[in-house]
Amino acid sequence: MIYSYYPGCTLKNKAADLDMYARQSAAALGFELREIEEWQCCGGVYPMAKDEIATKLSSVRNLNDAKMHGQSLVTLCSACHNVIKQVNNDMRTNEDIRTRANNYLKLDEPYNGETEVLHYLEVLRDVIGFDAVKEKVTNPLKGKKIAAYYGCLLLRPGSVLKMDDPENPSIMEDLIKAMGATPVVYPMRNECCGGYLSLEDKPAVAKRRETIVNSAKDFGCDCIITACPLCMYNLKKNESGVPVYYFTELLADALGLKAASEETA
Amino acid sequence: MDKKEEIELISGVNVLKCMRCGKCSGTCPSYDEMEYHPHQFVYMVETGNIDPLINSESLYRCLSCFACVERCPRGVEPAKVIEAVRLSAIRQKGANHLKAEQVPELIDDDVPQQLLVSAFRKYSK
Ligand code: SF4
Ligand code: SF4
């Protein structure tokens, strides 16, 4: 199985681990991620304005590259996933945006939202299957209590993202079970971490961080997992010292890849 | 075109659908940081009282977290109204909220690229 893969700007830099462990795990689970050539940054936040085209074009170019290869497009960062999936929905359902974007891009054939956009977690659940993941686990994370942090962008708006129930998700909890650990369900798991406000209002983000981490801690977690580099940045320096990991790191660990790569390192 | 029509055009939102239940503001993670709250944005656009919103720092407190969009029982999509008012403000010449020169003093070594990219998309044109 080969997928087109969109890493995005942060996975090439501050979140290189999120990317590296995802690729290692994919290889172990039997699927391949073909990185899109000359991909362009998604812009980090979905441009909601109906009259903006320029800010949506990079997503359309990435989507069209996957279409040209006849592949589904896999994303990993929650923000990239949100932006690309919502723009794809615009290209499929909003005639004005579709027409103006195609008029500008002048592709060999117009792009009309044909590409299927899958988050890496959806590949695990819907293509590989969590049972098959479980069978490949050689280092079960037994006894670990893991709190999945969804934040805002993975799930919302539910009518477009369609990954899971936006108010009562289970995809990461099911992955945690497949890895041999115990999921911790807590109230703040799908509330925003404060996002880009950490640039100019650090106290407000600190408040969000402590509320979220305390919620997870109160329900008994040892650690938190996320798919988003900005959630990672906003949550990891919490006062309780609860560790925050990318979900791909724990996945690679459960698949026995982390010990192996550390031995060779 | 007056301001109200401009906001409706940019956002694609029909503010008349709002029944003023306040759920959007109740669920908003930035509520405490806002002078005008999501339901007020919707109501003030409806009544054409838009200048106070354009001049308010509340524009830069919305996180685009889509909580209000998901949870509004009337499908109003308040975040899109706030986005449209913010664009109406920063699209004016020289009105960027964030300038590149300010960035070095706002960041540390751990800042992910995503943070800067997102902030520029929301704060500058
Ligand atoms: S949740 Fe929806 S209907 Fe209720 S006040 Fe907000 S915009 Fe209006
Ligand atoms: S999208 Fe903005 S206004 Fe809506 S709940 Fe989130 S922060 Fe509040």
Image: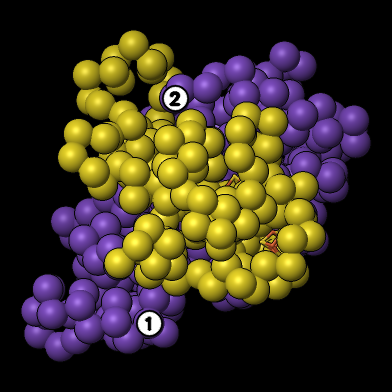
Quarter of the figure with residue A218: top right
Display colour for chain B: yellow
- Determine whether the residue tagged by mark 1 lies in a helix, strand or loop: loop
- Determine whether the residue tagged by mark 2 lies in a helix, strand or loop: helix
Give the percent coordinates (x, y) of residue A8.
33, 49
Label 1 lies in what chain?
Answer: A
| Quadrant, the C terminus of chain A | top left
Is B92 displayed left or right of A265 in the figure?
Answer: left
Q: Is residue B42 depicted above or below A187 in this figure?
A: below
Q: Which residue is mark 1?
A: A94
Give the percent coordinates (x, y) of residue A187.
84, 45
Q: Which residue is mark 2?
A: A199
Front in this rendered view, residue A206 or B83:
B83
Amino acid marked by disc 2: Leu
| Quadrant, the N terminus of chain A | bottom left
Front in this rendered view, residue B55 or A225:
B55
Residue shown at 47% from the left, 49% from the top: B50
Quarter of the figure with residue B66: bottom right
Display colour for chain A: purple
Give the percent coordinates (x, y) of residue A152.
61, 50
For label 2, the crowd category at 10 Å Cα-Cα, with few meaning under 14, some 14 to 19 and many 20 or more, is some
Residues at marks 1 and 2, CA–CA distance in whole angstroms = 33 Å
Residue shown at 66% from the left, 63% from the top: B70
Q: Is residue A50 depicted above or below A173 in this figure?
A: below
Say whether mark 2 is within 8 Å of ligand 2.
no
Q: Is residue B52 depicted above or below B17 in this figure?
A: above
Front in this rendered view, residue A244 or A239:
A239
